[in-house]
Amino acid sequence: MKHYFFESAIVAVGLALLGLFVYMGIASFAARDRVVSVRGLAEREVQADHVIWPIVYKTTGSDLQQIYASLNRTSAEIRSFLEKEGLPASDISDGVPQIVDLWADRYASSEAVARDRYNVTLTLTVSSAKVDLVRSLISRMGELLKQGIAISASDYGSQVEFEFTSLNKIKPQMIEEATKNAREAAEKFAADSGSKLGEIKSAEQGYFSIENRDQYTPHIKKVRVVTSVDFYL
């Protein structure tokens, strides 16, 4: 009888330990299901580091050879002005002149036919990392009027574009900042609910957006990212 009693005791202890382990496993599994989902925001204002500036010049005439000679002179004078002020020649490129034959328009009026036959548009494009220099030159283009060059600034295609191309340099810091912001929100939630914040279960970086700060300062950009983070409680 003693022999069976000893074996029964061993079995009972084993079953008790098994039950304890099962209970602890279930409790641990249930705890792992307690998750808080939060979002973290990071924003920065940065200066544009690249600019694209189309310089549009228009003229009219009826002799194409004279028009092309005039365009070449005008292009050279604009280039000379820009380079003299410190803009590298490699930052300036010539476009193909766009020519409209007014007389070829079947609906042209007799008044239009009486005027110059060709309407020509020439575009020089400045693509440069010298944003501050270009901004100062844009405000001084009126000086070309002294040379008889009138720059068209009202066309849709002549709008200046400011870009920020160094996003990869600030990405790690902004993601870290957004994640820290998310953790602070999660810690506040955990404290309010009487819980303790655990490790990160999952995280999603989110999309980086770059926009003008406002319509008046397009050379200043606002960079924004939102991260989504799930924490265990």
Image (cartoon, rainbow, N blue to C red):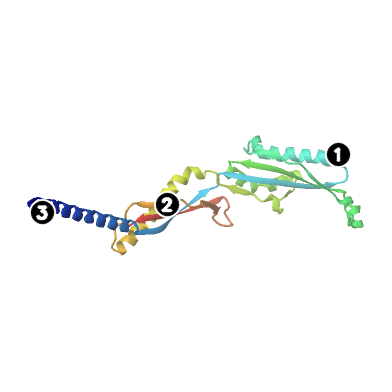
Write the residue at 71% across / 45% down: 144
Local crowd at mark 3 within 10 Å, few (<14), some, or many (≥20)?
Answer: few
Q: Quadrant of residue 195?
A: bottom left
Q: Position of residue 138 (x, y in %)?
A: 64, 47
- Name above or below for residue 136 compared with residue 38: above
Write the residue at 65% across / 35% down: 90
Q: CA distance from mark 1 to mark 2?
A: 65 Å
Element marked by disc 3 = helix
Q: Position of residue 122 (x, y in %)?
A: 76, 44
Q: Residue 5, labelled with which disc?
A: 3
Element marked by disc 1 = helix
Give the residue type that dot 2 points to.
Ala
Asked whether disc 1 touches disc 2, contact meaning CB atoms under 8 Å apart, the reply is: no
The residue carrying mark 1 is 65
Q: Position of residue 166 (x, y in %)?
A: 52, 43
- Residue sticking out furthest to the front: 1
